[in-house]
Image (tube, rainbow, N blue to C red):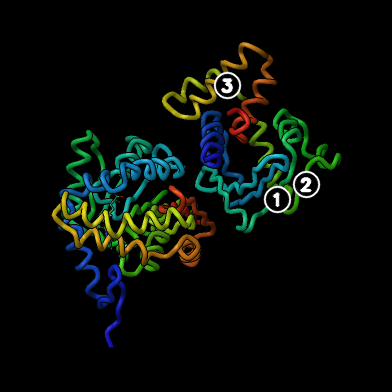
Amino acid sequence: MKKTTHFGFKDVATEDKQGMVRSIFDSVASKYNLMNDVLSFGTHRLWKHYTIATSNVKVGDKVLDIAGGTGDLARAFKKKVGYSGQVVLSDINAAMLSEGRKNLINNGTTDVQFVQLNGEQIPFVSGSFDCVSIAFGLRNVTDKDQCIREMYRILKPGGCLLILEFSKTDIVLLEKCYDFYSFNVMPQLGKIIANDEDSYQYLAESIRKHPNQEILKQMVLDAGFGACEYHNLSGGIVALHKGIKI
Amino acid sequence: MKYIILQRALNYLFEVHQIDTQLLDGKVIYFSLQDLPIKVNFVCTNERIFVTNNTDATSDVNIKLHLSSFLALIRGQSLAELLRQDKIIIHGDIKTAQLLVDLLQQIEFDFEEELSKYTGDAVAYKVGKIMKKFKSSDNSSTSIKDKITKFIIAPKLFH
Ligand SMILES: C[S@@+](CC[C@H](N)C(=O)[O-])C[C@H]1O[C@@H](n2cnc3c(N)ncnc32)[C@H](O)[C@@H]1O
């Protein structure tokens, strides 16, 4: 029997998921930034700002941003590491990566490397980065444990992992409003602005299928990280997991 | 948020004073200020200190003390003396605790000078506000140092 995994609320053959995720991001790439701002009312910028503030990245560090898409984190990291440091913006999807490249150039950020890669098989040598981040990307990865193990491998001893991802709120009223917004408003906005209702339906579903804060923390520890903590943002709608390789 | 402020402040101070944290590399220090809601782990690694709220991780040493004893330590009082007076509780590797204290004691706070390097940052803004307040009332450098230290570890007290 074929192995299956979830794609939003659907069960699909494990080997098919990556291609299906790719077509979602092919379809949303050109409108991705605009949709991000509209759907989160700009809050994604604050979540990313918090991620950078907590990263402890310093001048001269090497940072890899996985599933980096349009490059918001990479740009902020570049400011932190300076000219002596190195930032690699990576994504599995060529369309998203090229949007990222355009954004960085338009914002005057140069000296960032771009690599098309799958987070499950990172083509860098072990122990080569001070920090690795993945923002709103992990839930799209087919084998999340493998991706976390890969991020662990490429970090130097003492390196820091940052996973910013939608999560679970335990505030009942907020959860109700959020559910209504995700399943009724978001896909409709997707239809109006990006002419793409299905992708935004997938977005809402994939968030619900993503492991909650405690489970993800355990996954990070299981991958070998000596310490992991998470910070709930916006009442737990988003969580930042921070793992340290000790 | 207080963890981020503490993490940034510590790393910043160690960096500007060129204090080598390598002796603490790989150490996890549980640190609790008993009269304030501060219970953190300092994870010392990769030439920096991470401040985490995940205090269930195993630590090399546990340090528990009150704010007044912490300030006394920073001002140079010896760890042994505070231990003798039961003003600090230490479980685990006392050498690690002593190393941390040695590093903290090396920090020479010259806030006005340091502040100018912090421009455009929320910490600088808050510290700047506090500095102004203190300047008009109390000028003693020890007092300023105490108050800034309090701000760094318990920013809410100054809201
Ligand atoms: C929601 S976007 C996030 C983009 C960006 N990090 C941000 O926060 O705005 C998710 C990204 O994950 C990428 N992605 C999905 N699966 C991936 C994988 N297996 N490896 C690397 N990137 C992947 C997608 O191509 C997409 O660009």
Pointer 2 indicates a residue of which chain? B
Mark 2 or mark 1, earlier in chain: 1
Task: Name the mark on residue B115.
Answer: none
Position of residue A109 measured from the top left corner of the image (x, y, whole percent): 24, 36
Mark 1 element type: strand
Q: Are marks 2 and 3 on the same chain?
A: yes
Amino acid, disc 3: Ile
- The image quadrant where one finds the N terminus of chain A is bottom left
Q: Give the mark count.
A: 3
Q: Residue furthest right?
A: B85
Mark 2 element type: strand
Mark 3 element type: helix
- The residue indicated by pointer 3 is B130
Quarter containing ligand 1?
bottom left
Q: Residue furthest bottom?
A: A1
| Foreground: disc 1 or disc 3 | 3
Q: Does the beta carbon at disc 3 come under 8 Å from ligand 1?
A: no
Q: Quadrant of residue B129?
A: top right
Amino acid, disc 1: Asn
Mark 1 or mark 3, earlier in chain: 1
Question: What is the distance, in whole Å, between disc 1 and disc 3 at their CAs?
Answer: 31 Å
Q: Is residue B100 depicted above or below B157 in this figure?
A: below
Observer-nearest of A114 and A47:
A47
- The residue indicated by pointer 1 is B62
Position of residue A243 measured from the top left corner of the image (x, y, whole percent): 48, 55
- The residue indicated by pointer 2 is B89
Pointer 3 indicates a residue of which chain? B
Q: Residues within 10 Å of mark 2 (few under 14, many from 20)?
A: few
Observer-nearest of A54 and B59:
A54
